[in-house]
Amino acid sequence: MPSDQFTDSAEPTPHDSAAQGAAKAGRLRAEADKLEAFCVVVRAASAAADHAAFVEVSRAASQALHAKFGGGSITSVFTWLTGPAGSAALESVLAGEVKLAGPLSIQQVVEAVELAKKSELLRQKR
């Protein structure tokens, strides 16, 4: 009698579990990288001294986002950070599921997300 006769085919095999774990780790890594890159954009935008400087940051951000993620704008950065995907990425970092790999500390990321939230609220009130 074959031994696999008593196993449930819907039950994940160790290989499936490892593949799922690797896929989740890859997704978390990609989201954390996006979170951090977007927070760098927010920090640069918030440091702009005037409209001309903000426009320059916006252009540079668009070029960098296109190179790294295939597209994006400063507006999409703020929208992503304040939406469900940004919140989930931040929670993964805060919970220790994934570590930041770039130049920002967790505190700097949290502060940038808060800046993005404030900016989005102001933008929506206009």
Image: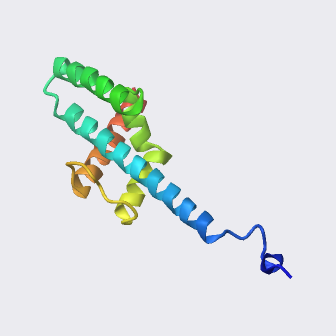
Name the residue furthest front. 1
Rendering coords of residue 91 (x, y %): 41, 58
Task: Name the quadrant of the N terminus.
Answer: bottom right
Q: Which of 39 and 31 is in front in this view?
A: 31
Rendering coords of residue 93 (x, y %): 36, 59
**Is residue 107 left or right of 92 when viewed as pictured?**
left
Name the residue furthest left. 49
Task: Name the quadrant of the C terminus.
Answer: top left
Name the residue furthest top. 52
20 relative to 109, above or below: below
Quarter occupied by residue 66: top left
Residue 36 can be seen, yes or no? yes
Rendering coords of residue 60 (x, y %): 25, 24
Q: Residue at x 42, y 48 (%)?
A: 31
Q: Which residue is drawn at 82% across and 79% down?
A: 2
Rendering coords of residue 109 (x, y %): 27, 50
